[in-house]
Image (spheres, grey):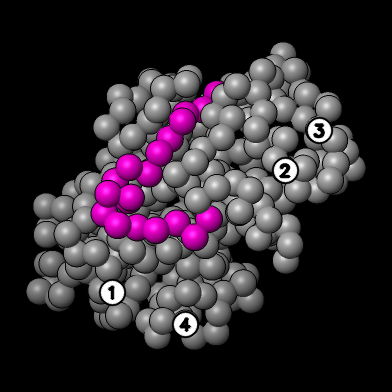
Amino acid sequence: MRVLVTGGSGFVGQRLCEQLIEQGHDIQVVSRRPHQVRDRLPSGCDIRDSAQAFIESPPDALINLAGESIAGKRWSDEQKAKLINSRVATTKQLVVLCEQLQANGQPLPKVMVSGSAMGYYGDQGKRVVTEETKPNDEFAHRLCKQWEAAAQPIEAMGVRLAIVRTGLVLDAGGGSLQKMLPPFKLGLGGRFGSGEQFMPWIHRDDLVAAILFLINQETLNGAFNGSAPHPVTNATFTKTLAKQLNRPAIFPVPAFVLKAGLGEMSRLLLTGADMRPARLEAAGFTFQYPTLDKALDAILRD
């Protein structure tokens, strides 16, 4: 199968491309800087600077993971616009590719798996969150809503669309855990604010497996929560990580400090959702790392 991936050089995309190559698929990667990302991707990936550059070799499947890091910079109005545009523009590029293929009478992809995030639901307090839960209107929700909406036109062309609302992605070598580990290893870690906010999380290998599952299961469409079946509060996450490292976790970061330092972006750390992968589990997907203990043990042991 020929698979086109956006965001292929990112933390999830790299592992995904490795898996696809191992399974014998042909990989097309869209990157604004093909020469800079070549070393991060498996040999054999065809890397070009736009989706339209693949018009002569139409993909069988699309996987859309591109987007500027949501926690990279303080959320100024300019940064908010960048966060939205980096996701929406890339998604629209894939829709335009399909429109061009259709106009040319070329075969269309059979499926598109498109990224979204737990931020779709906004702050849900202690409520159990499934794909049916009504979102709380805030910036993270509006960002994800526009991201998801940009992919919707592809369905009218007969392309199956599955959207993955991803939790905190955990693994060695990148992502949120890489930023958390240094203070925790020094015994300087601690909860954020009250620590009662939920942190939906998923091991990177399980997220990649879920994406491949959605590609291959021809009856699945719509939104899917991409998170492990046992989310934890920030306090529990903190204690579990400290225990795995044999370190104390006695230095909480007060909410007012995070708000002063990060502004509105502090909501990423101080709010959350008890998000469950209801539709993935109902479809028969099995998690290799269903609990945080098991995930962290595997990550930190390597």
Instruction: Indicate left or right for 232 with 104 as reference.
Output: right
Between the C-alphas of marks 3 and 1, the distance is 48 Å
**Looking at the image, is mark 2 or mark 3 earlier in the sequence?**
2
Q: Verify whether residue 280 appears in magenta.
A: yes
For residue 241, which numbered disc appears in the image? Answer: 2
Q: State the residue at coordinates (55%, 84%).
A: 43
Between the C-alphas of marks 1 and 4, the distance is 18 Å
Residue under label 4: 22
Q: Position of residue 263 (x, y in %)?
A: 64, 21
Q: Position of residue 95 (x, y in %)?
A: 25, 56
- Which secondary structure lies at badge 4? helix
Q: Outermost residue toward the top?
A: 256
Residue under label 3: 249
Q: Please state which of the two labelled residues, at mark 1 or mark 2, is closer to the viewer.
A: 2
* Few, some or many residues within 10 Å of mark 4 (<14, 14–19, 20+): few
- Which secondary structure lies at badge 2? helix
Q: State the residue at coordinates (57%, 24%).
A: 197
Residue range corresponding to the magenta coloring: 271-289
Give 239 or 11, whichever is nearer the viewer.
239
Q: Position of residue 166 (x, y in %)?
A: 45, 45
- Which secondary structure lies at badge 3? loop
